[in-house]
Image: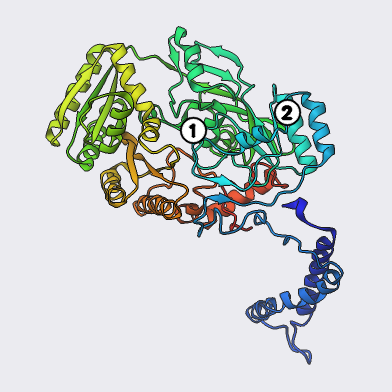
């Protein structure tokens, strides 16, 4: 990063640049033949220049030697790679969950500026910094924690914080509901954690336009409680505790994505503070627009690496008039996945299709004192008019019977439906309850084209079942997205390595089927190592160029999303 360079390294760089210029001028002047013969052909000139490039590093080294001879301290190479991270961590060969980073003490003058901006709305308390620097349910860890945690109350506060960070080149890590899985809120370089939870105002509700303008700290559950009296709701439902800002940053979805899409499809516009302190609004409140670059979609999923989101305009939906929730059982997970695929092919407008393997059902039984059949299970939700919802349920019941499914039941009572989805939302906590207290979890997700779901989930399940570790599979089966939760004892290195091996095999199985390494959890530090395989180096270099243009000092959540081995 820029603030790691010494003045002597800059002098060396300048000397090196001058040497390159002199050598190129010399070679260009040498291209015409001696004795008055015509200049060499373009092809010969290109060959000579190509050969000469091999000598440039030698000339550069000789010229830069004098500048370096008087400064023997180790300095960072002037490169547009990320020098703060060990290239093995988060890179394509990474097997380590502990993210390393370069850290320096934040200047006292910087802390004083923050105190002038925020008064008492910041802390350097060690326990508070550790709380914010260690994600609650993430397998990934960091050697460092934030140096200071700040609690802005307004966009103006955020703007001033970012401008101070950019001035002193101090890293920034945005923080929402702390529900992210892939290490998005780690602080490998220390710096400032910006906790957005105080910014949870509802700025305007436009019932007739079916949209709402909110600050990023409000949670989706809290938002839906506010909207319920108006007969409206926001149709994304990730883990409990997730906030709107974090949901935008990770491009999350949830069980309702099969009908309503992901966060990308449900945000109309954003306001964000860029690394230089400039505030941008990405669009109007119109339901569609073809005006300029789609900056809204650029920021959604950027995980705080391009800017800090301070306001979001969301699309809303009418609460369904009626709904039916159905469950059915299968002897194999492949049969269950086949039914999910067949349901989508039949054109059934389901709002949820959730798949739970037998281990997940067992965990739910133990945690909730239930007596569900411990076999692969599908859960459906059908919405619409009462007649339409029941009709759709009966069509799916027939599909289930054609695929050896059994025990198809559906409920219409409001309390019974709420209880079933409450159990589903608490699935992760049920798994933790079944494992010893000291166990941790790798929680991963992949997504494949719908036609490959049954094959991918079956292959992954075979590998998971063959392991000695406790593993469960749970899927948003209607859009090809499924999760594995692998429990392990962190004190046992062989268990940690086995858990990582299972995660690695599951991801590469999905990638081999034209799928993605992350359907909804995002990249963070955990999935960076798979991006080159999935997207290619050209796409990653393009991302790096965008990042470098908007954040030249690399202060915005450094060490996330873009693999450290990507150079431009």
Measured in 3D between alpha carbons, the distance from the residue under mark 2 to the one under mark 1, in whole angstroms, is: 32 Å
The one nearer the camera, 342 or 497, is 497
Residue beneath label 2, please? 122
- Mark 2 closeness class: few <14, some 14–19, many ≥20 residues within 10 Å: many
- Which quarter of the picture shows residue 237? top left
> Residue at horizontal 62%, vertical 58%?
567
**Image coordinates for residue 552, horizontal then vertical, percent:** 71, 47
Badge 2 or badge 1: first in the primary sequence: 2
Colour setup of the view: rainbow
The one nearer the camera, 119 or 261, is 119
**Image coordinates for residue 311, horizontal then vertical, percent:** 62, 24
- Which quarter of the picture shows residue 185? top right
- Mark 1 closeness class: few <14, some 14–19, many ≥20 residues within 10 Å: some
Q: Nearer the viewer, mark 2 or mark 1?
A: 2
The one nearer the camera, 19 or 443, is 443
> Residue at horizontal 54%, vertical 17%?
212
Residue beneath label 1, please? 264
């Amino acid at each position: 990063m820029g603030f790691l360079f010494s003045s002597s390294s800059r002098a060396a760089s300048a000397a090196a640049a001058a040497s390159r210029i002199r050598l190129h001028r010399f070679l260009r002047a040498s291209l015409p033949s001696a004795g008055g013969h015509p200049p060499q052909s373009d092809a010969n000139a290109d060959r000579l220049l190509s050969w000469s490039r091999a000598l440039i590093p030698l000339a550069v080294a000789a010229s830069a030697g004098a500048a370096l001879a008087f400064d023997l301290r180790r300095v960072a190479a002037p490169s547009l790679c990320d020098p703060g991270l060990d290239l093995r961590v988060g890179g394509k060969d990474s097997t380590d969950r502990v993210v390393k980073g370069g850290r320096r003490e934040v200047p006292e003058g910087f802390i004083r500026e923050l105190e002038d901006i925020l008064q008492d709305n910041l802390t350097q308390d060690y326990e508070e910094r550790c709380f914010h620097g260690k994600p609650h349910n993430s397998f990934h860890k960091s050697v460092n924690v934030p140096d200071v945690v700040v609690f802005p109350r307004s966009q103006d506060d955020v703007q001033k914080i970012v401008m101070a960070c950019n001035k002193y080149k101090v890293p920034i890590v945005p923080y929402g509901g702390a529900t992210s899985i892939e290490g998005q809120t780690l602080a490998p370089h220390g710096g400032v954690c910006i906790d957005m939870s105080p910014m949870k105002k509802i700025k305007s509700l436009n019932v007739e336009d079916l949209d709402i303008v909110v600050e990023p700290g409000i949670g989706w559950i809290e938002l839906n409680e506010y909207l319920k009296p108006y007969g409206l709701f926001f149709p994304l439902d990730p883990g409990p505790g997730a906030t709107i800002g974090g949901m935008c940053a990770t491009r999350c979805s949830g069980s309702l994505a099969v009908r309503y899409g992901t966060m990308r499809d449900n945000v109309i516009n954003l306001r964000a503070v860029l690394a230089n302190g400039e505030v941008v609004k990405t669009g109007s409140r119109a339901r569609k627009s073809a005006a300029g670059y789609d900056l809204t979609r650029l920021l959604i999923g950027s995980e705080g690496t391009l800017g800090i989101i301070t306001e979001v305009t969301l699309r809303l939906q009418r609460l369904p008039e009626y709904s039916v929730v159905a469950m059915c059982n299968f002897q194999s997970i492949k049969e269950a996945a086949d039914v999910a695929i067949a349901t989508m092919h039949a054109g059934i407008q389901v709002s949820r299709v959730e798949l739970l393997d037998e281990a997940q059902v067992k965990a739910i039984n133990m945690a909730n004192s239930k007596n569900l059949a411990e076999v692969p299970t599908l859960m459906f939700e059908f919405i619409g008019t009462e007649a339409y919802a029941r009709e759709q349920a009966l069509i799916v019941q027939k599909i289930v019977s054609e695929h050896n499914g059994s025990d198809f039941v559906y409920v219409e009572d409001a309390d019974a439906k709420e209880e079933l989805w409450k159990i589903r939302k608490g699935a992760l906590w049920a798994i933790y309850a079944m494992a010893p207290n000291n166990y941790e979890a790798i929680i991963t997700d992949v997504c494949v084209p719908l036609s490959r779901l049954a094959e991918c989930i079956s292959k992954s399940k075979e590998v998971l079942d063959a392991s000695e570790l406790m593993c469960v599979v749970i899927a948003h089966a209607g859009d090809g997205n499924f999760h594995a939760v692998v429990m392990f004892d962190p004190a046992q290195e062989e268990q940690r390595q086995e858990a990582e091996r299972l995660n690695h095999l599951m991801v590469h199985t999905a990638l081999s089927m034209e799928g993605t390494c992350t359907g909804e959890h995002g990249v963070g530090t955990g999935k960076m190592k798979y991006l080159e395989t999935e997207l290619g180096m050209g796409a990653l270099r393009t991302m790096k160029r965008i990042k470098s243009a908007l954040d030249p000092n690399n202060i915005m959540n450094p060490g996330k999303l873009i693999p450290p081995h990507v150079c431009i």
